Image: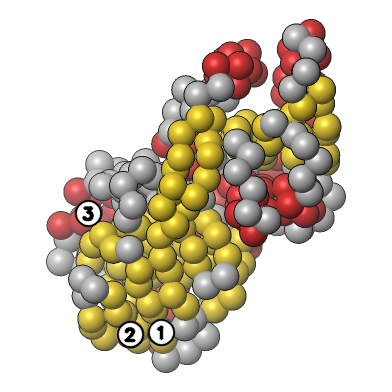
Amino acid sequence: MEKIKIIANPKSGKEQAVNKINALINLMSSDGYKIDLRFTSKRGDAMLFAQEDEGEDLIISVGGDGTLNEVVNGIYKSNRDTPLAIFQAGTVNDFANVLKIPSNVRSFYEMVKKKNVKKVDLGMAGDRVFANVAAGGMFTNIAYQVPEDKKTLLGRMAYYIEGVKEFAKLGNPDANIIKADINCKELSAKEDVLMFVIANSASVGGFKYLAPDAEVFDGYLDVLIVKELEMYDIPVLLPSILNGSHTGHDKVIYLKTKEITFDANKDVAIDVDGEKAGSLPMTFKILEEALNLVVN
């Protein structure tokens, strides 16, 4: 009998996570799996649950990118090699979507039964691991600015509303521009930066091609730096983000690296998979083949 630990955020996906979990457990129980179900109630629970090795053969993360981040940190920090499966139930599920992980309960269960495990890369931001993305500057605080009740009620629309509010700040450069000191093997520069993204996969914030060349298997981080913009840049830059052609814009720096350090002239908070994770200065690096992930 195989033992499976399910770590779940019951408030994920307009609180539909519990219904999905019930359906999944019904399927697993009928096949004789032993289930250990852990519901999170506060920040940090998912990481602690993932750190506890109770002999499970598989961990399933149920929730959004924030829940996944905690589970991945728990697995990594405890030096575990237990495979992870991602059952997406959150508002945004970039990492699962880019890997084409099924969101349908039965399809997900069929994937789990196949036991196809592949090693994938993770990123490191300071001392915190990330599955999908680390970022700083404008727009990067949206994930934790949206209250939980609005996420539940409005879903993805809540993020778009906060995004519109951020655009309104473009007329105040003193508040938004970061005088950044950027250092890696591929680039050493001082730039006036609006935002930067360090991605492990192509999809960030629901934009499928924000880091269009990123792959979770290639041993590199993809770095997207948006320099100071004028209002007339927006009509050109925004549509190009939808197809990935924005990397050629003259206000965008795009590169691949294994390690990069950012410093700044002011306090800049860092967002890691939608969670706060310290502030600059910070070094970001790739952790090659650091996670055993169940895939299709």
Q: Residues within 10 Å of mark 1 (few under 14, many from 20)?
A: some
Compare marks 2 and 1 and give the one earlier in the sequence.
2
Q: Residue furthest bottom?
A: 265
- Residue type (three-letter) at the residue carrying disc 1: Asp
Q: Residues within 10 Å of mark 2 (few under 14, many from 20)?
A: some
- Residue type (three-letter) at the residue carrying disc 3: His
Q: Nearer the viewer, mark 1 or mark 3?
A: 1
Q: Which residue is mark 1?
A: 263
User: Where's the N terminus, which quadrant?
Assistant: top right
Compare marks 1 and 3 and give the one earlier in the sequence.
3
Name the residue: 50% across, 24% down.
116
In this rendering, the answer to whether 42 lies above or below 296 is: below
- Residue type (three-letter) at the residue carrying disc 2: Asp
Compare marks 3 and 2 and give the one earlier in the sequence.
2
Q: CA distance from mark 3 to mark 2?
A: 22 Å
Res. 149 in view:
no
Name the residue: 53% across, 39% down.
292
Q: Which labelled disc corresponds to residue 41? A: none
In this rendering, the answer to whether 93 lies above or below 274 is: above
